[in-house]
Image (cartoon, rainbow, N blue to C red):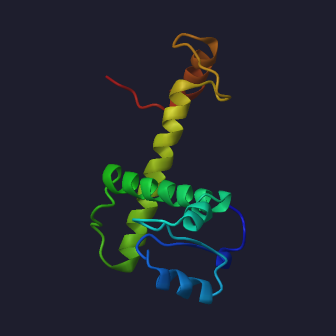
């Protein structure tokens, strides 16, 4: 989205006109606060600006990422206690998410987005190179 951090604000709950005025009074230049219900023609035009749409999409993407971490990687409940424990939970969920993304990409492509057949020289080379690191199955 660009811009300085103090010039962007994304608020999910504050949909009131007063809340928007208070945000602008704080010096925020681009407050992305969609208005629910009836919207005037001016408000519709305001919400159709490129920066507003990008901000709304950015927030929706962030909410989707948080939901995925929460449900798939156990962030719904932290088994560690305190603030340090919560930080630990978030880090482990992020690491698990990244490892899952890496594994899905390694399993389906040859590294540059090209699909690699199951029986190919590239896969055989990869398997031969890393075979020594795999545990022996008996």
Above or below for 23 versus 1: below
Above or below for 119 versus 133: above
Question: Which one is nearer the viewer's eye here, 120 or 58?
Answer: 58
Most extreme residue toward the front is 41
Q: Which quadrant would the C terminus be assigned to in this image? A: top left
Q: Quadrant of residue 119?
A: top right
How many marks on residues? 0
Going 51% across and 70% down the picture, which residue do you hit?
A: 33
Going 40% across and 73% down the picture, which residue do you hit?
A: 13
Q: In this rendering, would 62 be left or right of 80?
A: right
Q: Which quadrant would the N terminus be assigned to in this image? A: bottom right
Question: Which one is nearer the viewer's eye here, 61 or 98?
Answer: 61
Most extreme residue toward the top is 119
Residue 51: where, in percent of width, then height?
A: 66, 61
Question: Which one is nearer the viewer's eye here, 93 or 58?
Answer: 58
Q: Quadrant of residue 49?
A: bottom right
Residue 134: where, in percent of width, then height?
A: 46, 31
Going 65% across and 29% down the picture, which residue do you hit?
A: 111
Residue 97: where, in percent of width, then height?
A: 45, 49
Most extreme residue toward the right is 3
Residue 91: where, in percent of width, then height?
A: 46, 62
Going 48% across and 65% down the picture, which residue do you hit?
A: 39
């Amino acid at each position: 989205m660009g811009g300085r951090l103090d010039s962007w604000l994304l608020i999910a709950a504050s949909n009131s006109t007063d809340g928007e005025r208070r945000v602008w009074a704080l010096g925020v230049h681009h407050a992305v606060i969609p208005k629910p219900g009836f919207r005037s023609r001016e408000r519709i035009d305001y919400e159709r600006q490129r920066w507003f749409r990008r901000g709304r999409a950015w927030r929706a993407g962030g909410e989707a990422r948080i939901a995925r971490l929460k449900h798939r990687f156990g962030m719904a409940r932290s088994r560690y206690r305190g603030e340090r424990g919560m930080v630990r939970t978030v880090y482990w969920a992020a690491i698990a998410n990244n490892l899952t993304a890496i594994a899905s990409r390694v399993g389906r492509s040859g590294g540059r987005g090209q699909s690699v057949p199951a029986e190919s020289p590239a896969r055989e080379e990869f398997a031969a190179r890393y075979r020594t690191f795999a545990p022996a199955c008996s």
